[in-house]
Amino acid sequence: MKFRSTTFSASLAALCFSLGTPAVAQHTAHPHGTPARLGKVHFPVECNAEAQQAFNTAIAYYHSFAWQHIREPLEQVLKADPSCGMAHWARALASLDNPFTWPGGISPAALAQGNEVLEGARRTGLKSQREHDYVEALGAFFRDHDKLDHRTRAKALETAMEQVMNKYPQDTEAGTLYALVLSANFNPADKKYTNQLKAASILEPIFKQQPEHPGAAHYLIHTYDYPPIAKHGLAAAKRYDQIAPDAPHALHMPSHIFTRVGAWKESVQSNRASAQAGTDKTFDKWHAYDYMVYAHLQQGEDSAARKVVAEAMGNPARVDHFATAYAYAAMPARLAIERGDWKAAAQLGVVPADGFPWAKYPQAEALNAFARGMGAAISGDPVAARVEVERLEKLRDVTASRKLSYWVEEIEVQLGVVRGLALCTDGKRTACLDTLRAAADREDASEKHVVTPGRLIPAREVLAYATLEGGDAAAALKAFESVLEREPNRLGAYAGAAQAAERMGDRSKAAEYTGRVREITQSADTPIADIAQAKRLLGK
């Protein structure tokens, strides 16, 4: 099936709640023997001064999602003050991993042990009502975990943390943690961004009052990580890596905003720094790799993207984490899909094939099936495409059995795209476009997950190219422009919009979009068809 003439998708001064101890910078030991630069955090606890300092360090690590480093300062807390029960509270909090990956990011062991850890906090010593309130608030999440679903328990935690914040209005740590949970509990279908904007209204004053607070900066980035509001996160994005430069995740997080506004060079720089700082024992490196690959490809830097993929795939470390699984599956698929190499997409190695525990992450394995299915359909093999449809259906059912409703929706969209393309290959163009349109509408009703810089390809971009191939350039242009509203500076959408405008005879728009292709690919390191097409159009 001839799908397109060029590549298909180428496309606070500190003002904090104080119990007599001023806000202090964190200074736990850094691997090189120097203090770790983690920002300034003061979470008051009723423990001695040495324990307080170590507790601050642990919370600073938490705010940059560096959970692997929390154990040591918490041990220092209990060594300095064996009656400091809040150390156990912090341990339970950290065990929940990244709230933005809930529920899948929480290990069954963490849920099973949570109540016991919090009981350890009570036995060890909680010396104020405030400390008791923190423990009971977190307990709302662990309570009846074997009977209540995740959403009910996450909402209970949100409500309990809001009560702590309101009861202790000067306690900015309560406000910061409440905003985190509130933002993470967002509804993917809420296009008014109710939770996110409420969280931002809490975090913005804290960030203004405590400009070195890592949590305020970090959670503002997550809160604004949506196309219509992303520009509001630029201030936090430009500061977070300076606030906590010794936390790999802090080096990466600015790229969430850079990706949303299409600032590709800044995204590459952010993720390169994060990957270099990350170790083989955490997910941070691979998470950064995937974001880096995506940004390179949007600039036509294919050679650079392939080097990143080769480095990632050649690393023998296999970090058992969803973000790692996602990156492993996504990066090779991106190389093929972004450049319309459909034979390569169809021939991607089937995962699991390398000893990685893919069975734990069906939503990541689905990326592989999706890419293979697209590749087969566009290469003219609908039979092979439908084999991948069956595989996607099985992965969807496993995902549903684990109550990962967001990812069930994502796989349903992938199914719609592959099914639609197979119909096009069969010559059933009306059914093809109807199926692709339904998939695009379904995808647009939700948001991308924080684990990814972007879907392998927007479903509406697939629809746009199919529409263009079918001869309706005006409808195709409208679809490409819709993609660009959600995914600014996306190369494939710019290239397609330029082609559609040319076919319509709209020279102004053709020149505008062609110019954007040239602008974002100035550092391209590989001759690609979209750049050649842009040069041809500019030459007219």
Image: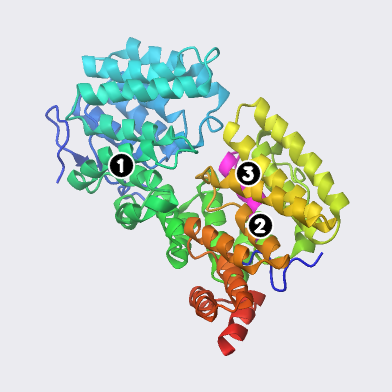
Q: Can residue 315 be seen in this view?
A: no
Q: What is the number of the mark on residue 42?
A: none
* Magenta highlight range: 319-335
Mark 1 or 3: in front is 1
Structural distance between the alpha carbons of marks 1 and 3: 30 Å
Badge 2 crowding class, 10 Å Cα cut-off, few under 14, some 14 to 19, many 20 or more, is: many
Label 1 vs 3, first from the N-terminus:
1
Of the pair 50 and 244, the residue shown nearer to us? 244
Q: Main secondary structure of the magenta part?
A: helix
- Specify the amino acid type for callout 1: Ala
Q: Is residue 196 visible?
A: yes
Place residue 5 in its image quadrant.
Answer: bottom right
Instruction: Give residue 410's position: percent from left, percent from top.
Output: 62, 41
Instruction: Give residue 52's position: percent from left, percent from top.
Output: 23, 29
Label 1 vs 2, first from the N-terminus:
1
Q: Is residue 333 magenta?
A: yes
Instruction: Give residue 165's position: percent from left, percent from top.
Output: 25, 26
- The residue lying at 28 percent from left, 13 percent from top is 125
- Specify the amino acid type for callout 3: Ala
Q: Mark 2 points at which residue?
A: 463
Q: Name the residue under label 3.
A: 325
Structural distance between the alpha carbons of marks 1 and 2: 35 Å
Of the pair 478 and 185, the residue shown nearer to us? 478
Label 3 vs 2, first from the N-terminus:
3
